[in-house]
């Protein structure tokens, strides 16, 4: 081989080595930049706001689409075949009420909610007391937890009780401060008032909502820092009370027995909903049968657009659709947890924990029921299930959480800086747009 050939090979090898080294360095730089961006984004004081707002908005939009799909059969039956949009238009109306309410609430300062806590609690208590008026109380599915007011319509007071109790617990427990280390201060008035609300909810035989209220109270007490011994005692008492209520009711007892596989008839009415829900989830596969193409809703799945809308999501959007819903609720939980950890105000911490325990806890209870790992309880999937009371109160709660996120240390300054940068960008672009229009 000639000296020229050897030299050419060496130059080619050196060039190849330098290219691979440059490629490796570029990849390391890109990885480092991504890590820096991820760290900066996580540390940003606005991340909590965008997590809560983004996840809530996507869940609301997905919920409207799925209510439209899941409720068509029921709407056709209600209207005698005239229109398939009755339930969807109702849900759209509730969203049109709840979204502005959330936007207004997101602009409030946290101290305003604290000042209004007693008034909000009194309003929630007054609504719940309407169940004692026979002419107003409405019985649905064995539970008397609905109220019908002339000129307003039918609503569920217990949904407003969740919101009122969360704000009030935040205000009272934050005021108590270090006194919560003493049992009497932890019990009075927080636990006693919460117990009164539980009693009113159980008066209507709504055990599902009562369990969510228990989770809400537990979230508030845990973040407030009550003694662990009292927390364990209250949890044990709540579990014992729930067990008594389950086995003191024939309907609830049969549901539990059916869930445990101890029922005499495996094809009993109590197992119809869970069986159809699992059938829907199983037929969806990875990507689903297509939006609006559900077959199980035509086969009489009860509450397809209400408590069992997750089954319709699984059938029409498949495993990917159900994972999206779960990830959105996880993102919402992360955003709320950031507020609890980062905010210096105890009222904000406790109230955010209570609201998070309610919304996220109820979501995973509903999902657990639909996939068959929990017995049938009867609670809606927040932001996704049809229902005006649930949607409006959940959106109001998200608005309050957004207000808390906006008041995180450094958040207001960050939002102001971003608005300033947007205005500067528009100021630069405006002359160019005018010149281009003049040329045109």
Image (tube, helix red, strand yellow):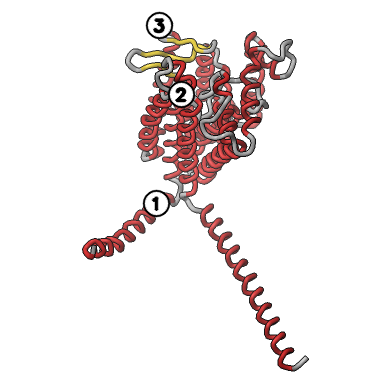
**Residue 48 rendering spot, x and y as whole percentages:** 49, 45
Question: Label 3 belongs to which residue?
Answer: 135
What is the C-alpha distance between the residues marked 1 and 2?
34 Å
For marks 3 and 2, the one nearer the N-term is 3
Q: Quadrant of the C terminus?
A: bottom left
**Residue 61 rendering spot, x and y as whole percentages:** 45, 36
For marks 1 and 2, the one nearer the N-term is 2
Does residue 219 appear anywhere in the picture?
Answer: no
**Residue 135 versus residue 235: which sits nearer the camera?**
135
What is the C-alpha distance between the residues marked 3 and 2?
22 Å
- The residue sitting at 57% across, 17% down in the picture is 207
What is the C-alpha distance between the residues marked 3 and 1?
50 Å
Looking at this view, name the residue that lies furthest to the top. 134
Q: Nearer the viewer, mark 3 or mark 2?
A: 2
Question: Label 2 belongs to which residue?
Answer: 387
Question: Label 1 belongs to which residue?
Answer: 415
């Amino acid at each position: 081989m000639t000296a020229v050939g050897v030299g050419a090979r060496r130059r080619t090898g050196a060039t190849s080595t330098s290219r691979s080294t440059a490629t490796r360095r570029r990849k390391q730089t890109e990885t480092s930049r991504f890590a820096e961006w991820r760290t900066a984004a996580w540390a940003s004081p606005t991340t909590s706001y965008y997590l809560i707002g983004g996840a809530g908005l996507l869940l609301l939009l997905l919920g409207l689409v799925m209510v439209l799909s899941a409720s068509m059969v029921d709407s056709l039956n209600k209207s005698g075949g005239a229109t398939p949009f009755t339930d969807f238009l109702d849900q759209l109306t509730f969203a049109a009420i709840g979204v502005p309410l959330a936007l207004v609430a997101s602009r409030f300062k946290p101290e305003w909610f604290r000042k209004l806590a007693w008034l909000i609690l009194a309003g929630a208590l007054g609504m719940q007391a309407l169940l004692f008026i026979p002419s107003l109380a409405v019985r649905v599915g064995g539970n008397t937890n609905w109220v019908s007011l002339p000129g307003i319509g039918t609503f569920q007071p217990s949904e407003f009780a969740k919101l009122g109790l969360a704000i009030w617990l935040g205000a009272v427990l934050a005021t108590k401060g270090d006194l919560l280390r003493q049992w009497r201060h932890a019990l009075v008035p927080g636990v006693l008032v919460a117990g009164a609300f539980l009693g009113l909810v159980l008066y209507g035989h709504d055990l599902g909502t009562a369990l969510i209220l228990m989770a809400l109270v537990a979230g508030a007490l845990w973040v407030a820092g009550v003694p662990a011994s009292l927390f364990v005692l209250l949890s044990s008492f709540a579990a014992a009370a729930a067990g008594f209520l389950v086995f003191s009711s024939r309907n609830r007892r049969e549901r539990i027995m059916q869930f445990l596989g101890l029922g005499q008839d495996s094809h009993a009415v109590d197992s119809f909903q869970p069986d159809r829900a699992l059938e829907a989830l199983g037929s969806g596969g990875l990507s689903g049968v297509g939006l609006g193409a559900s077959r199980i809703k035509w086969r009489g799945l009860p509450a397809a657009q209400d408590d069992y809308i997750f089954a319709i999501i699984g059938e029409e959007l498949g495993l990917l659709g159900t994972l999206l819903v779960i990830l959105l609720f996880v993102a919402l939980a992360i955003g709320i947890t950031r507020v609890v950890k980062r905010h210096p105000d105890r009222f904000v911490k406790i109230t955010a924990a209570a609201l998070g325990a309610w919304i996220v806890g109820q979501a995973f209870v509903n999902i657990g029921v639909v996939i068959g790992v929990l017995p049938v309880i009867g609670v809606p999937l927040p932001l996704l299930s049809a229902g005006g009371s649930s949607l409006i109160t959940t959106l109001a709660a998200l608005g309050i959480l957004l207000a808390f996120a906006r008041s995180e240390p450094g958040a207001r300054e960050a939002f102001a800086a971003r608005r300033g940068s947007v205005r500067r960008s528009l100021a630069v672009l405006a002359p160019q747009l005018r010149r281009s229009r003049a040329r045109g």
